[in-house]
Amino acid sequence: MAGLLSRLKALISKGWAALSTLLKREYGWAIGRWRRSMQFRTVLVTLLVTFLTVGGVGIFLSNQIANGLFQERLEQATAEAKRSVARVQNKFDGTNSLQVTDKAGLVGLAQGVLKDLSGDTPDTNRGYLLVLVPGQNSQLALATSITSAENGSITPAILPDDLRSSVRGSSKSELFWKSIALPVDDKGSHPALAMGGKVDLVGTSYELYLVFDLNKTQDTLNYIQSVLWISGAAILLLIGGITWYVTRNVVQPVSQAALVAEKLAAGELQERMNARGEDEVARLADSFNKMATALQDQINQLASLSQMQRNFVSDVSHELRTPLTTVRMAAEVLYESRDSFDPVNRRSAELMYHQVERFQDLLADLLEISRFDAGAAVLDWESQDLFSVIDRVIDAAQPLADQIGSTMTVVSAVEGDHCVLEMDSRRIERILRNLIVNALEHGEKKPVEIFVAADAEVVGIAVRDHGIGMDQEVLSRVFDRFWRADPARARTTGGSGLGLAIATEDSHLHHGKLEVWARPGEGSCFRLTLPRRRNIVVDHSPVNLPPEEDPTQLAPELLEFDESLKAVGSSDEK
């Protein structure tokens, strides 16, 4: 028995769990549809309002009809009860004690009178009950009640006590009524109306009750109510169907416009809406298609111009390599022989040598950008220690730091100062060199910190300066090509405005992120986040932005960035 109960409990528990899961899933689906579908919201709200309206009107009409039917039946019953009580009293008044000598005769008289009353009308939903008023001690008084109902359903037991009390204390001219439940065999009961008054028979007062069965009236009311509710349900379905059809005709073009807009944003510029008819929706679709066509033409034109520009830069860069090499060789010869020149020519040889070197760096940047645009840039993957790359960059930038009067400090949160990852060391070195040189130039002779932290998946390097910083306008364009914050500003080294653009492309090739934080007067911070292995997706950084100066505070979790943060994601995220 215990095993059966335990299995039953387990079965109930599983069923409840399944039901809970189903309800949660359906609830989640309904909430999702409510948030995403305007048509679903409109139809649901319309059905709810219609249900409340139809329900309220139906309940009101049902109550009014029920009250009307009951009042009508009550008036009929009252008039009939008055006539019946008067007739009974008249027949009893025509009888005296000389005609009725014993109780058997009295019973026969009473039964005869009640049967005569029942037979005078075809209404079978009515019954009579004659009950002796308590306290009467006449020798000819009836000891039991007399009823006209053949099935014995009308007895004093069905009468409410308050109705009998009212009839006992009344005069013969008064009538009282009460709603009761009339037993009907073993099938239950019918609603009924009991009306009572007083009559005298051979000097003795009796209670005379007339019971009216209201089952036919109740059947009529039930039929009317069922018609009302069926009509309400039909109206609800009809209004719901109309609402669905109307909202579908309005929402479907909007949904189609949203879908086409998403495809256009994804680059499928040939997508268009279906324009049918001449109504407002058709005009909207036609206007949308014209806008899409104009955008496609402009985008194609811009793409063509961009491609022409890239081809021009690439062609010019390649064409300049040969003459530049010749000019550089000549400049080197003059530069090496400058000691034999007079001061004016010696200075000219030095200027030509440095400017040709700068020109060569610019040409190298242009060629690198051309490779990125052509998709010809590839990585030379190898596992190397990041700190060895950082040391090489710092050694190369040390003369510039000494010239400026600034210092460079590495703040590491990596145990053992060894961090091996898969990378193209040449490109990573170029990124870090560009960031550190920029920090030295813009740092206003203040110290520059290089923060390094790593976890099992990614490595973060942040280069922080405390110089002039940048405002929002500068931040929005800091990674653009050929753009500098202040072209007229005196700088210690030359620049083409391509350094950060190349650094961004190099980080893309490594599936990493290059981000920047800056505020005017507080300095800037560039953060490079790289995966430790090439198949890892960068979705966080172990270095805060901006980082804390205490290396123990470099928490390996992604924090909320400042509102002035500008991020350049990996190529996968583009």
Image: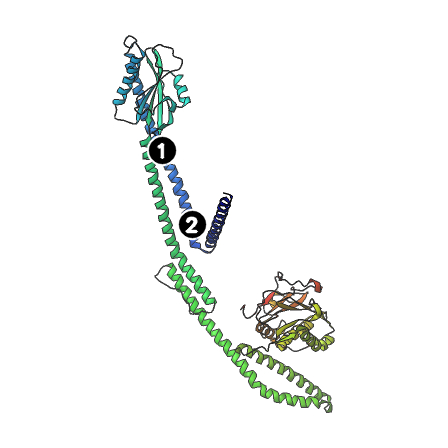
**Residue at 38% of width from left, 42% of height from top?**
54
**Residue at 47% of width from left, 69% of height from top?**
267
Numbered tag placed on residue 104 in the rendering? none
Numbered tag placed on residue 66 in the rendering? 1
Contact check, label 2 and label 1, Cβ < 8 Å: no
In primary-sequence order, the first of circles 2 and 1 is 2
Q: Is mark 1 on a helix, strand or loop?
A: helix
Above/below status of 161 relative to 215: above
Residue 9: x and y, percent? 50, 45
**Mark 2 — residue?**
44
Query: Mark 2 is on which residue type?
Result: Leu
Residue 208: x and y, percent? 34, 19
In this image, 475 relative to 343: left or right? left
**Residue at 42% of width from left, 46% of height from top?**
48
Residue 419: x and y, percent? 66, 71
Above/below status of 498 relative to 342: above
| Residue placed most toward the observer, 134 or 557 | 134
